Image (tube, rainbow, N blue to C red):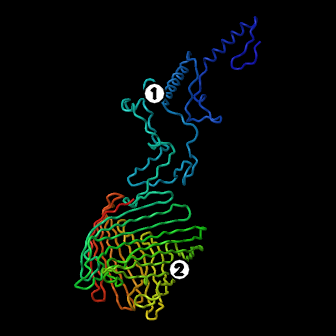
Amino acid sequence: MPGPATGRRRCVFGSRTLLACLVLIAWDGSRARAQTLAPDMLRPMVGGLGSPQDPPLRKLAVDDRTDDSTGDAVVDDRRRNSKAQAVSQAGQVPEYGLPPASGAADTGFDSLNRTRKKPKLHPGQARPKAPAGPGSRVPAPPPVNRAGYPRLSVPPSQSANKPPTPPAMAGTVTGQPPRTRLKVDDDPFGAVGDYAGSFLIKSAVELGGGYDTNPGRLNVPKGLPFWVVAPEFLAVSDWERHALVADLRGSFTGYGNSLPPTIDGAISPAPTDVSRPNFTGHIDGRLDVTEDTHITSQARLLVSTDNPGSPNVQAGLVRYPIYTTLGGTFGIDQNFNRLNIAAGGTADRTVYQNSTLTDGSTSNNDDRNFNQFGGLSRVSYELTPAVKPFVEVEGDSRVHDLALDRNGFARDSSGGYAKAGTTFEFSRLLTGEVSIGYAAREYVDPRLDPLRGLLTAASLTWTATPLTTAKFYSTTSIDETVLPGTSGVLTHTYTVEVDHDFRRWLTAIGKFTYGTLDYQGDNRIDKTYTLEGDLIYKMTRNLWIKGTLRRGILASNVAGASSASTVVMLGVRVQN
């Protein structure tokens, strides 16, 4: 007998029921051929609900052999739709899931390190196209061939046998952040340097030659040709903590000929060989004990001679005697929030060579040798990150090797200075330090008057335009002398320098220096004026060509001590 009906009815085949089952099967088949499909019956379902925008699934096998004309029309339409859908999707890779960083906010950065704010465009950069929104036109699918595959956009001959460009180089990797632009080099012709371990080392040497109309700074000028060699060395540490800097600069000016030993029958006040060396070097170190406590130190060396035209130069010399000053400073630097206190001790030793005279004899300069010991302290307070006023006090004692000099004066002394100023930085256009104070020195010999005077110090840099920079320097020093009855020399110098770049490779430098030398106790006052112009042609980073024209004037209130000179020089600079 028949069981429960599920779809088609079940029959239990037997001898009595065979004919009844055949009749039932025939009747059910006729009913199945008469059924039609509703439009929404075979659409995909999400969570049990259908979406009217979802495309219909491909119709399952349906027996189109029916006598109903309506059923035939529906079957033909579904076949055409299924074929068109299969053709339009040919060659397309289906995408699953959500795109990366789709849940990020509208600001900040997403998981692909892409900014979510409005991008900043560079000059000449095209604006990115906005994504297609609702109602925008969607591009038509690519054309297909008879087999249903997309047609090639270019002939095969134009794309065959060509290696594809890596996506990373083409910039087409999905989610790849844009590449950052390289920083513009502020000095495209500056020295790059080399690394030796953790030190950046830069070196250079200048070679030049020219003509000096008065190298001895005589009242009656006598010109000579000259040549110059000036090496430089700079090493800077690249450490996370602590620091070490070595800055060494030197020069030697040699003259091909000699000056006459006598002028109008009198002994010349200038040496016959006016060649001069000059070297200035210092090594600075900093030890970071804590974030606010630092131990500082400096070792320094100075090699030079007396300036031409100075009254300290003996008459009848073969060459200038060389003096050497070797010293150092050791101190501590402590920060208390915005308050900074720095203190240290100094020690220096100055030694002169013996003088060689034109008659073959020598003159001892031991009376000019002395040791200097002192200490200094500086207190500063940071009002703002751009303004930091300070007060600095220094004191020292000078002890000579000989109690009396060649003229019988005891030159041991003690003194120092006090000054107040500030360091500042205004919009990075005007930076530097300026201070003013008072300097004084007392001598052991009562015949030598105390030396006193105004102290000025400044180092300012003004970036007027990206191509023009102005600088101002000012220094004050108390120097020793051997003039009888003269306590010392109070020296002030003021320098104004303007640099202008006509091109990145062509720079002009103008410099003016004014100085005063007050010989206290002798009533002698010398004034110096120097006007200099340099033109630098930078061929490469490693090779420069430099031309110099300099005019110097020494005006003195002592008769016969004034002089003037003009220097013309052309040289090259090789640097690394």
Q: Mark 1: which secondary structure?
A: loop
Q: Residue furthest top?
A: 15
Image position, residue 95 (x, y; %): 54, 36
Mark 1 or 2: the one toward you = 2
The quarter holding residue 432 reads bottom left
Furthest-bottom residue in view? Answer: 447
Question: The disc labelled 1 sits on which kind of residue?
Answer: Tyr
Residue 159 in the image: x percent, y percent? 39, 32
Residue for badge 2: 376
Instruction: Please name whichever residue, 5 or 339, is drawn nearer the observer in this view of the structure.
Output: 339
What separation in Å lies between label 1 and label 2 (alpha carbons)?
88 Å
Q: Secondary structure at mark 2?
A: strand
**Residue 478 seen in render:** no
- Note whether 200 is above or below 102 in the view shown: below
In depth, the one of 191 and 525 nearer the eye is 525
Q: Amino acid at mark 2?
A: Leu
Looking at the rendered image, the quarter that the C terminus falls into is bottom left
- Which x, y percent locates residue 496? 35, 76
Q: Which residue is mark 1?
A: 149
